[in-house]
Image (spheres, coloured by chain):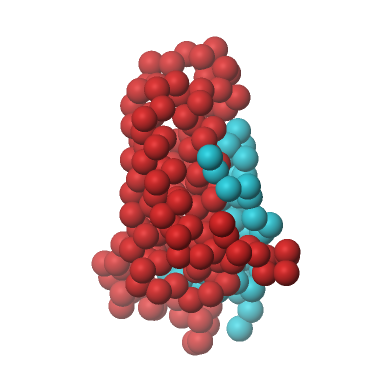
Chain colours: A red, B cyan
Amino acid sequence: MPSVDNGTRYRASIPDWYSVRSSALRLAQIEKLTDAIPRWDRTVRFFRDVEQSRFYVEEPTDFDRENHRAALHLLIGLGRNWLLETQNFTDQQWSGYGMTRADLAAYIADLEDTFFMFYVPDPEPGRTAELQKAIFGANP
Amino acid sequence: MPIPKIIAELYGARYDWQMAPLEEKAEMKARFDELMTQAAKAYGRSEMAIWIAVSDNYHVWRRQNRLPKPSPKPD
């Protein structure tokens, strides 16, 4: 169970990373997309809570980064697989899910951008530093 | 030095995209994309170059500006 800091802020514990990954792995066993996608949504939101706690409230450890990275791979992979499975869906079929294909694609892109921000190295750090100076001034 | 207005708006849009309910993700992403286009035009660089340059500071902005309430634990 996650601990709660005086009821106002959630503090993730290390086992919460296991909960995220095991929840994601269980999603792959669900056949009905009408069940799987809402549960994936809840899993992603819990992932974001753990990320918030371990990356933004506290400083992440290597353990946090390894689990964060693994969880992103799992969640993105599931979403991408469902995009493929639904590529011939009609608008009427999508309306049964309460969202559009564009919504699912945008959700996956959100996760992919998180992976990009945290784990893809900058190919041109020198040029980036110059641009940062132009945007933020001498001390970004 | 304060964050340029266009970048602060971009950060807000990035956060809104992440936090949006499933059925609003496309709309929020479209807003972020629109602001990215504006920022790319303002600085004369590609959208990817802009995001690479500002995304590190996004984490700082998140710490200082956005601490959402937690969601229910999944099944």
Above or below, comparing residue A59 to residue A80 in the picture: below
Most distant residue in the left direction: A123
Residue in the foreground of this view, choosing between A7 and B52:
A7
* Res B39 visible: no
Left of B63 or right of it: where is A26? left
- In percent of width and height, residue A78 lies at 37, 37
Q: Residue at x 36, y 33 (%)?
A: A28
Q: Residue at x 60, y 64 (%)?
A: A3
Report the quarter where the N terminus of chain A lies: bottom right
Q: Position of residue B71 (x, y in %)?
A: 63, 50
Q: Is residue B63 visible?
A: yes
Q: Residue at x 38, y 78 (%)?
A: A129
Image quadrant in which you'd find residue A32: top left
Report which quarter residue A95 is drawn in.
Answer: top right
Count every numbered label the image shows and give the total: 0
Position of B56 relative to A47 (above/below): below
Residue at far front of view: A1
At which x and y percent is residue B67?
A: 65, 64
In this view, which residue lies farthest toward the bottom?
A138
Residue name at image x 62 percent, y 40 percent: B21
Q: Would you place residue B9 above or below residue A30 in this image?
A: below
